[in-house]
Image: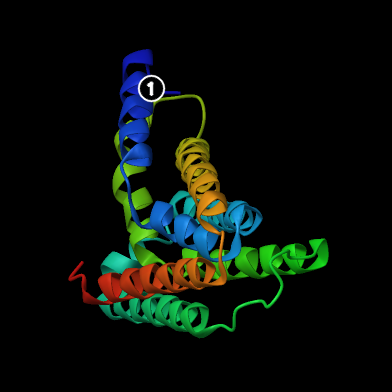
Amino acid sequence: MPPFETLLAFFLTTAVFAYVPGPAMLYATAQTIARGRWSGLMATLGIHLGGYAHVIAAAAGLSALFHAVPSLYLAVKLLGALYLIWLGIRMFRARLEPQPEVSAEDMRRRGWRAFAESVSVEVLNPKTALFFLAFLPQFVDPAAALPVWMQLFILGAVVNLMFTSADVVCVLLAGALATRLKGSARVQKGLQRAGGTILVGLGLNLALQKT
């Protein structure tokens, strides 16, 4: 593995990237305020597992395809953006549950829906792939005993875990705030619409970014 100084720089830089508010935090927060803390945690799990697709791609060198074939990057980016916008519109227009208390079965169903959506959102985010491709090689030691692909995978897994820890913190904070605010149907509907608006905004931001 790389020397201690390199690893220390890797952990410090990763922590900065992880805990600076970004799209994943906003996405997990949107799921939480619209569907509850359990859905937010399941969304975070989905983002985490989807992230491993990019870690594996970076380790295998597949992410370089986005650099070699710009049209592929554009197609995946637009597909991911459209999916986010569609999720946001659906969340914004969803009919409010008539009962103040949601059953355990409904909570599980919402959670698994959030999980499935989040895996798709993360896999369809090419900017994550490019981040891993640009960031991880800086901390790889070609002379180390471990092969380069294994170093990339280990470093990528650490990055993924650290980013997930930041998302979990956001979900817990958003869940506590949403619990206090959900005192009326009007507030609950407002939170649901706020979550949908955030998702639409994330989709538009992804679609309009030049790189």
Q: Residue at x 71, y 72 (%)?
A: 99
For this view, does 155 lie left or right of residue 114? left
Residue at coordinates 47% horizontally, 49% vertically from top-left?
A: 59
Whether residue 129 is visible here, answered yes or no, is yes
The disc labelled 1 sits on which kind of residue? Leu
Residue 158: image x %, image y %?
50, 35
> Looking at the rendering, in which quadrant would you find the N terminus?
top left
In the image, what residue occupies the spot 29% across and 36% down? 138
Judging depth in this view, the residue of 187 and 151 nearest the camera is 187
**SS class, disc 1:** helix
Residue 188, position in %: x, y? Answer: 53, 67
Question: Which residue reaches farthest top?
Answer: 4
- Res 140 quadrant in image: top left
Q: Decide if residue 153 is in sight here.
A: no
Relative side of 96 to 59, left or right: right
Q: Give the x, y percent position of residue 8.
A: 35, 19
Q: Residues within 10 Å of mark 1 (few under 14, many from 20)?
A: some
Farthest residue toward the front?
184
Q: Is residue 79 left or right of residue 134?
A: right
At x 35%, y 67%, the residue is: 65
Q: How is the image coloured?
A: rainbow
Q: Is residue 82 above or below residue 133?
A: below
Q: Position of residue 177 (x, y in %)?
A: 49, 48
Q: Is residue 69 above or below residue 6?
A: below
User: Closer to the camera, 98 or 69?
Assistant: 98
Q: Which residue lies most toward the left here?
A: 210
Name the residue that disc number 1 marks: 7
Give whichever of 177, 116 is nearer the camera: 177
Q: Quadrant of the C terminus?
A: bottom left
Quarter-of-image position of residue 70: bottom left
